[in-house]
Amino acid sequence: MTGPNAHKPLGLAMTKDGYPPIVILTGAGISKESGLSTFRDADGIWATVRVEDVATPEAFARSPEKVHAFYNARRGKLVSREIKPNVAHQALARLEAEWPGEVLVVTQNIDDLHERAGAKSLIHMHGELLKVRCGACANVVEWRCDLGLDNACPNCGIVGKLRPHVVWFGEMPFEMERIYSRLECCRLFISIGTSGNVYPAASFVQQVRRRSGAHTAELNMEPSEGATLFAEAQYGLATVLVPAYVEKILNGRW
Ligand code: APR
């Protein structure tokens, strides 16, 4: 489907500003076919557990064991052998490697599948499941095993203050200034596998639309909450749509 704001094809052609910069927003849908659950689908994470019980600072203050158990289960799954990047993650890494202009992936996902596929220019705006942060000294360290109240911070030695290095509801996502400055100058914005329910990510498309000449596309299983804001939309599996879209960009057909 192509909307009324459809772009003029730019392809690999150099514009007066150089090669068009690209920003890509990803959500849980891109990792679904790697075996990780989404949040708001019928079989998603929020169908079995309440946000308020496991993903807020208040939940952690009230019941840290429960919050640790929730993230320990997800971390254990992520490090298991069967979870691997899929062809959609790989296609985005290829785009970054082959596109002569800037490509930035901003992911809401806390998994490490983009980097395992080869992404270098990547922002984890909601944090990273394989890192923990100390509430006493603020040090961030890699962490691949279970986390509990008996763990000491490897930096300051204080016990019981480590928390998942993720952004909970009510907290500020990471690196917002850098994200907004890149949205400001991008010429192509692609949103992949996100339902558009969570802000500020859900408002990125509006930010890009303010800039004339920028193209916006949604690649998702179904229309997102903000579907009508995109100039172009394609619906289906990320593993089908994303490699084809990347091919199209690299062949100068967008
Ligand atoms: N390919 C493409 N899209 C898919 C696929 C797939 N294989 N499977 C599911 N989807 C789509 C769904 O249709 C849905 O629109 O991915 C979207 C996933 O939406 P959510 O579950 O809401 O995930 P996301 O948008 O990433 O959530 C944002 O909410 O709770 C938080 O912090 C969590 O980062 C997360 C944020």
Image (tube, grey):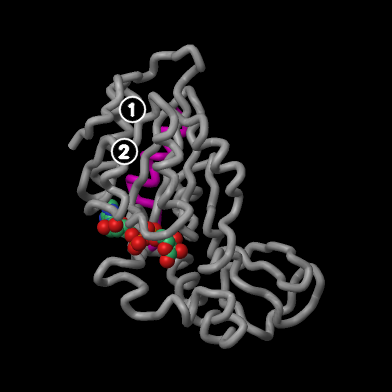
The kind of residue on which mark 1 rests is Ile
- Residue at the spot 57% in from the left edge and 68% down from the top edge: 144
* Distance from mark 1 CB to nearest ligand 1 atom below 8 Å: no
Q: Taking the image as drawn, is residue 33 in sight?
A: no
State the extent of the magenta-drawn residues as a range: 83-98
- Give the x, y percent position of residue 217: 31, 38
- The answer to whether the residues at label 2 and label 1 have Cβ atoms under 8 Å apart is no
Residue 61 is left or right of residue 97, and the answer is right
Q: Out of 209 and 243, give the one closest to the viewer.
A: 209
**To which quarter of the image does residue 38 belong?**
bottom left
On the question of residue 222 being in view, the answer is yes
Q: Residues within 10 Å of mark 2 (few under 14, many from 20)?
A: many
The Cα atoms of the two marked residues, 2 and 1, are separated by 12 Å
**Which element type, helix, strand or loop, lies under badge 2?**
strand
Q: Quadrant of ligand 1?
A: bottom left
Residue 210 pos. (x, y %): 43, 34
Q: Which residue is at the far right?
A: 156
Q: Nearer the viewer, residue 218 or 244?
A: 218
Residue 217: mark: 2
Toward which corner of the image does residue 151 lie, by quadrant? bottom right
Quadrant of the image for the C terminus? top left
Task: Decide: is 4 above or below 205.
Answer: above
The kind of secondary structure the magenta stretch mainly shows is helix
Residue 249, label in figure = 1
Residue 252 pos. (x, y %) = 32, 20
Residue drawn where x is 36% and y is 55% of the image:
196
Is 95 inside the magenta-drawn segment?
A: yes
Q: Quadrant of residue 251?
A: top left
Give the vertical position of 115 relative to 11 (above or below).
below
User: Where does residue 132 sit, x and y in percent of width and height?
Assistant: 63, 67
What residue sits 58% from the left and 65% below the top? 171
